Each structure stands twice: as C-alpha cells, then as structure tokens.
Image: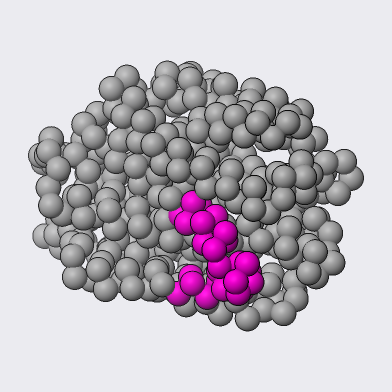
Amino acid sequence: MATPTSTTIDQPQAAADRWTRNSVLVLITCILAWAFDIYEQTILQLVTPLLIQEWNIAPATIGLITTVARWVGLIGIFVFPALADVYGRRPILILSILSYSLLTGITGFVQNWQQLLIATSVTRIALSGEQPVGTVMVAETAPTKWRATALGGLIGGYPFGYMLTSLAGLVVVPLWGWRALYWLGIVPALLVFFVRMGVKESPRFERVTAEMLKEGLKRQLDILAPARHYPRQMVLATVLYFCYLFTWIGWSAWMPQFLANEKQLGFQTTATYLAIWMFAAIFAYWFCGFLCDRFGRRYVIPAFVIPAAILLVVLGGQNDPVGLFVVGALANFLITGSFGSGLGYISELFPTVIRGTAYGSAAFFGGVGAALAPAIIGWIATVHSIAAGLPLLAAVFFLLGPLFLWFAPETTNQELTDFIGQK
C-alpha cells in the first residue's frame, strides 16, 4: 500500500483531552454492538446442557461445533476490519450488525446439531467482524489520556451481553424453550438505524483518506502491509490475541456445562451465577482500563492475569456451591478485567491507514489456534472432566504476564499514528 511517510505529512494534532458528543456516541454505540454480539455468541454456551440432553449428543460434539464455527468466523475477523480500512469504519460496522442479527434469528429454526453447525458458522462470520471494527473506531475517537479506559469499557459490553443472555434464559427458556433466545437475536438490527443517524465516521480515517486524495494516492486493500512494515508488532499482537482468546473461549464455552452438570448446580443456579459474575465484570473492564491509563499496561495487566491463572486451577477442585461462586467470581473478574485493555492494546500498535487490517490479521492468525480451545476442553471433558482442562487454560493465560512485562512496548497515553513510518 502506497502511503505518505512521516517526511511528507505533518504530525497530527494531539487528540482532545476531553470527551466530545461524537466520541461518547461512538463508545456507547460500539458497547451496545459488542453486547448484542456477545448475546448472540453466548446462546450456544448457555443452552449446551439443554442441547446435549434433547439431541442426546456428547460434549465433544458441542466442542466441535464451537471450534468449527470459530474457524469459519475467522473469515469475518479478517475481512471486515480490512474492508474498514478501505470503505470506512461506520459502514462496515453497520453491515456487521445487520448481518449477525438476521442470521441469529434464522438459527432458531435448526432441527439437529448438523444444521446448528452450519447456521452458527455462517453467523459467526458477521459476529467476528464487529468487534475489531468497533475497537478500531473507539481507539481512534477516544481522548488519548482516556483511551485505555474507553477500550476497557468497550469490551465491558461483553459481560453486559452475557448477562442479557443469562437473564433472558431464566425468563424465556422455561416459557418458550431455547429457540426463543435465537429469535430475540433479531432485535440488535434496530441498532443500525441509531448508527446511521447518530454516529459519524472516525476522524482519523477521514483525515487519512483526505491526505491520500491530496497526494494523488489510491486507497487499496493491502493485506500484507502490516507484516511487511511492522513484523515485530504483528508477532506480538498475534500471540497476545491467541493467549486471550484461547483462555476465554475455553472458559466461557464450558462454564455453563461445568457448573450445571459437572458440579451439579442445575440450569437455574448456573444462569444466576453467570448473570452475577457478568454484572460484576462490567465494572472490571472499566476498572482495569482506568488503572492502565494511570499506571500503564506493563504492570497492571500482569497484576490481573497471573492471579487469575492461579484461581482457574483452584476452581476445578471446588465442590461446595459457595466456594464455586466465590472463586469463579474472582477469576472471572480478573480475566475479564484484563481483556478489554489487553485486546485494545493491539489497535494501538499500528497506524490508522492499516489499523483495521493489522488487527484483523492478528485476530485471524491468533484465532486459528485459539479456536481449538472448545474442542480440546470438550475432548478432555469427554475422557476426564472439564476441571481437568482448566490447568491448560490457566497456563496459556499466565503467559500474558511476562509478555506485557518484558516484550510489549508501552503505548498508554501516547498519541496514535496515522501513516506508515510516522513516529
């Protein structure tokens, strides 16, 4: 991709140190988009015990569905943010929300696990494209000194969406069955109208586009640009993404089954536990982001991930309902708290002109390996137990500590760059 260099482009003005109407609207919109995204993703996790019983399938089958769907979803996580570098963040965000809403509603009509595999996989393409585009958009509009907090708050939409699924499950499933959770997934399509009316395009993207037009350069899709110009950052971003996603999707995919069946808490108690954990996690994202803005990610992220890894191992040995609730809540708080600022960090490593493509590439290659987590834990659960697989998730998550301590350059409170080669 031909781009202006730092010798021909003036340094951009520092981002405003205060929130504007548009930056607040962007953050709220992307939080809601992410929350509804997670609502759609979490349905399968929540109804896993019901599907295993209704269709008489093994836990490994659900693990296979989740893993294959995530592999297919890598198409979206790679393509959508790359398209956002060419056509803009706003239109691609709209496309993603509308697509995953309609496809989720269709999933409610499946009759067996094979149909569920196909429907979930196709829906995952659109679901996977939303989060990286939203992350890039928030990173480019939030004030510099509040960027880590904003990115943490954005991913805070995850527990909000998870909590919505758990609460909906408590109300809807006893009345109309698990399919109704999928049909409710059509509701987020209404968010598209809000995005079209209230949210403006990323000012950094507009600036890059205007500068390239002035220079007579054509914007094009160059998927190799991030690896060619920023190889070290790409390796770091890919490893970080793998460690976060491997642990989280392994944990979240099997936690309902772990609590409901393996620990014999039942569906209602499990849904209640998860709803409370995810409500607390909303604050964890903002809290960790705030600490990162004040003290930097280098020390704050390890302070969250290392004890979280230890608690994951401890959780597997708990049998008392109170112990399961307390240890699980603490582990979930620390895991989710580090998630927003940690994943948001990836978007700060690259300039605006290739930020979406770079994020999508790191998510694609990191996601290839991370998508194995549900299948691996499902296999371990079939042979032994879910608890036996928790040390593996803990070991991968623990690696984030030394990565941030010794290998990840600090970007907190530093101005983002717009062009390749710009310092």
Residue drawn where x is 64% and y is 23% of the image: 310
**Residue 201's x, y, as percent?**
20, 61
Residue closest to the far right = 383
**What span is in magenta?**
161-186
**Residue 388's x, y, as percent?**
80, 35
Left or right? Give the position of 193 relative to 102.
Answer: left
Indicate whether 184 appears above or below 315.
below
**Residue 253's x, y, as percent?**
65, 50
Residue drawn where x is 32% and y is 55% of the image: 30
Q: Which quadrant, please, contains the N terminus?
A: bottom left
Q: Quadrant of residue 174?
A: bottom right
Residue 273 lies in the magenta stretch: no
- Choose between 265 and 351: the one closer to the eye: 265
Left or right? Give the position of 258 relative to 339.
Answer: right
- Choose between 226 and 171: the one closer to the eye: 171
Residue drawn where x is 33% and y is 73% of the image: 190
Indicate whether 204 appears above or below 338.
below
- Choose between 267 and 69: the one closer to the eye: 267
Q: Which quadrant, please, contains the C terminus?
A: top left
- Choose between 185 and 15: the one closer to the eye: 185
Residue 165 lies in the magenta stretch: yes
Kindly tell me whether residue 416 is visible in this rendering.
yes
Indicate whether 390 appears above or below 114.
above
**Dominant secondary structure (helix, strand or loop) of the stretch shown in magenta:** helix
Kindly tell me whether residue 409 is visible in this rendering.
no
Residue drawn where x is 53% and y is 23% of the image: 401
Q: Quadrant of residue 45?
A: bottom right
